[in-house]
């Protein structure tokens, strides 16, 4: 390599190094300035957040909307009612016919039948309250296992009580 080539390369790399240093300096400076400037929040992003955290059903659409809301509330109440066993009836016959009959009509698994020797004898020996309590909580007796609420926990205590009362009335 000739001498002036070397000289050129030396100067050229110095120029390159200088420019690289200036570039890095500008980057750092721009970064610094960017940090000092206060940015306005992006309105579109803010709107998206508001949409996401908005409560459901906060829209009021006049009389039509109100009617629709009332309908929705009614539908929700009906849906909730259907969570209650057998539509929440306290008709012992209905509940027995849907559930308890599986064991208590045939006497399956040692279940006392609806006659004087079955439920009739038990109510005579223990009283109605005790029968209701054991039917609600379930128990294991000498003849078998009576599941709590006949195995349907959706039954309310009143429904179980009404059903036991109906059973007792049938067992004379
Ligand atoms: C899976 C079968 C089964 C179903 C379903 C069932 N029972 Fe029973 N039940 C029994 C058995 C078995 C006994 C007797 C247990 C014993 O004394 O050993 C019994 C006993 C009873 C007794 C007598 C309690 C006592 O103190 O002697 C009552 C009251 C009763 N059941 C009410 C009900 C009612 C109400 C339902 C429906 C909601 C129901 N059972 C559903 C199996 C069942």
Image (spheres, rainbow, N blue to C red):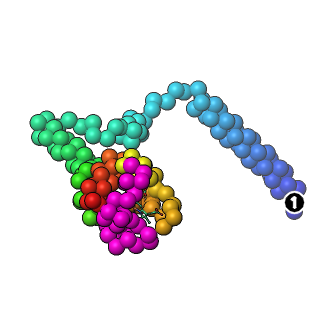
User: At which x and y percent is residue 99?
Assistant: 32, 64
**Foreground residue, 89 or 66?**
89
Q: Is residue 109 magenta?
A: yes
**Disc 1: which residue:** 2
Using the image as rendered, state which of residue 54 and residue 145 is in the foreground. 145
**Residue at image coords 39%, 38%:** 53
The location of residue 59, given as percent across then percent down, is 24, 37
Count of number-bearing discs: 1
**In the displayed structure image, the side of residue 73 where residue 129 appears, left or right:** right
Q: Is residue 149 above or below residue 102?
A: above
The quadrant in which residue 33 appears is top right
143 or 17: which is nearer to us? 143
| Residue 153 in view, yes or no | no
Magenta span = 101-127
Kindly identify the residue that appears in the image at 45 percent across and 62 percent down. Answer: 146
Q: Quadrant of the C terminus?
A: bottom left
Tell me residue 123's x, y (percent).
Answer: 37, 54
**Kind of element beneath mark 1:** loop
Describe residue 144's horizontal placement relative to residue 31 as left or right.
left
User: Seen from this angle, which residue lies furthest left?
Assistant: 63
Of residues 115 and 63, the one drawn nearer to the viewer in this rendering: 115
In the displayed structure, does residue 19 sit left or right of residue 166? right
Residue 55 visible here:
yes
Q: Ligand 1 is found in which quarter of the picture?
A: bottom left
Q: Residue at x 27, y 36 (%)?
A: 58
> 3 left or right of 157?
right
Q: Quadrant of residue 52?
A: top left
**Prevailing SS of the magenta stretch:** helix
């Amino acid at each position: 390599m000739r001498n002036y080539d070397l000289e050129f390369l030396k100067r050229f790399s110095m120029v390159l190094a200088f420019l690289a240093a200036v570039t890095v300096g500008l980057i750092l400076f721009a970064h610094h300035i960017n940090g000092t400037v206060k940015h306005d929040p992006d309105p579109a992003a803010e709107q998206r957040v508001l949409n996401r955290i908005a409560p459901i059903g906060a829209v009021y659409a006049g009389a039509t909307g109100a009617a629709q809301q009332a309908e929705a509330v009614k539908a929700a109440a009906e849906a909730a009612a259907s969570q209650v066993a057998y539509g929440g009836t306290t008709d012992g016959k209905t509940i027995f016919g849907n559930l308890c009959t599986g064991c208590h009509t045939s006497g399956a698994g040692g279940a006392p039948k609806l006659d004087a020797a079955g439920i009739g004898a038990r109510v005579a020996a223990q009283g109605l309250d005790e029968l209701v309590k054991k039917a609600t909580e379930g128990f294991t007796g000498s003849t078998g296992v009576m599941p709590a609420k006949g195995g349907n926990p959706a039954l309310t205590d009143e429904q179980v009580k009404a059903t036991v009362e109906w059973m007792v009335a049938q067992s004379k």
